[in-house]
Structure formats: structure tokens, C-alpha cells
Image (cartoon, grey):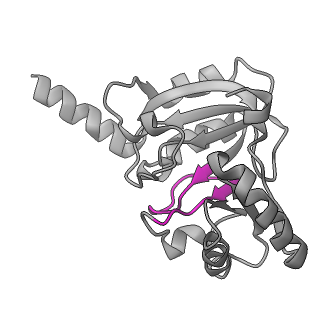
Amino acid sequence: MLKTENSQLQEQINKGLVLPVMEHFYTIQGEGHHSGKAAYFVRLAGCDVGCVWCDVKESWYSEGYPVLSVDQIVTEAQKFPSKIVVITGGEPWMYNLNNLTAALIKNGFKTHLETSAAHSPSGYWDWITVSPKKFKKPLANSIIRAYELKIVVYNKTDLKWAEEHAALVNEDCLLYLQPEWSKQEQMLPLIIDYVKQNPKWNISLQTHKFMDIP
């Protein structure tokens, strides 16, 4: 019986009718182009990229977190005044997000995504932020959809790596360099100099950490 129930649940997850949610909360977007805007965040559980400097390693596993229906997620989002919903992870594109995004849009929300682009795309998006990782390469048909490319800079060689990925996005994509939080003192001066010499790039900071908010 349990096997049948688990099988049925997995089928619902595969169809995107329900999704494992690590946490959901109302906050201020801290990074990138939309930094400073109020937004409702939905952090999906599960990730197969596994960055060594990930600051939410709890999101790597889907086991033990509640599985919420699309209707439940939308209902929770409706409790707050902002009409921006950010789907993050984990790695959101591990899941079929067509139903969730369609329901959010139907209810008047703008849909934003934060992804490594290591999986095939799904969903209907007003904004896609791609932050590619070295541990699992982005797919060409996923990274090309980015509205914003955000490269986390952990060491100097990441600047060359950033340029390699800037060549993979569309010409209208915004380009951001963001120092990894634990290396900010060392990396930020390098990024500042680099952006001054290469003004197609912008600087992103994790302002939510300065504000001490989620």
C-alpha cells in the first residue's frame, strides 16, 4: 500500500501537480537586477549540482520536506502584497514547473526563476536568472533563456569562466558578477576593477545578508 502511495505521489511530482518545498517566505530580493524588491520566495527541495560553497545545503535533498500542491503554494503567496514570486532551490528545473507558473500567472503574479540551467526548461517566466555552476554544466537550450546571467566569483579564474558563459546567453541578457560571500573581501576589489574595464558587466551583492534577512 505504501509503495502504491509513494508511486502515486512521485507521479504527481513528475507532472508538477505537487512539489517538495523546503521553505517559503516573504522577503526582499537581495541579488541581481531585481535587488531591493519585495518578493515571495518558494525554495524547492532537491538539487543534483552540489556546489561546495552553497549556503543552503539543506536544499539538496527532497526527503523530509512537505510536498505542497500548486493550489497550496498559490494560496500562501496570496497572503502577501507583492506580486512577485521567486522560485528557487535547490535546483527548480529538476521539476516540471508548467502548472505552478501557469497558476501563479492566472492569479496575477510575476514569475521569477533562479536556476543553474543544468536541466531542461519548464514553466512560463517573466524573469529567469541563470547562475551556472562548474559542478554540472548548463544546457545550451536552458542558458539561452536567461534574462540575467549571474556568475558567483570564488577566485580570480572565475572571471575567465564568466566570459565563457557570457558567450552562451542571448545578446539582451544582463551580465552580473557576484562575489562569493565568504570571499567577498578578496574578490570584490578584483570584480570592481574588472567591471570598470569591462562595463558590459554589472556588480551584484548579496544585500539580504547585509540586511540580515532571509
Please determine whether, in this image, residue 65 is positioned above or below residue 49.
Answer: above
Give the residue drawn at x 45%, y 27%: 69
Residue 157 in view: yes
**Farthest residue in the top direction?**
79
Instruction: Determine which quarter of the picture holds residue 132.
Output: bottom right
The answer to whether 26 is drawn above or below residue 201 in the figure is: above
In the image shown, does 27 or 192 lie closer to the viewer? 192
111 lies above or below 154 = above
State the count of labels. Answer: 0
Q: Where is residue 30, by image quadrant?
A: top right
* Residue closest to the far front: 186
Q: Report the predominant secondary structure element of the magenta stretch.
A: loop
Q: Nearer the viewer, residue 195 or 131?
A: 195
Say which quadrant the C terminus sits in.
top right
Looking at the rendering, the stretch of residues picked out in magenta corresponds to 114-134
Q: Nearer the viewer, residue 101 or 50?
A: 50
Across and down, in percent, residue 154 comes to 61, 59
Residue sitting at x 44%, y 61%: 119
Q: Horizontal and vertical percent for residue 153?
A: 65, 61
- Residue 117 in the magenta stretch? The answer is yes
Depth check: 75 or 58 in front?
A: 58
- Taking the image as shown, residue 143 lies to the left or right of residue 136, namely right
Instruction: Pick the quarter of the image with the N terminus.
Output: top left
Reply yes or no: does residue 53 show up in magenta: no
Q: Residue at x 45, y 39 (%)?
A: 57
Tell me residue 31's x, y (percent): 75, 46
Instruction: Kindly identify the residue that appears in the image at 77 percent across and 66 percent down.
Output: 190
Tell whether 16 sits left or right of 155. Answer: left
Is 89 placed left or right of 150 in the picture? left
> Where does the image place residue 139, in percent across and percent down from the top left?
48, 71
- Residue 108 in sight from this viewpoint: no
Please tell me whether residue 3 is drawn above or below residue 11 in the rendered image: above
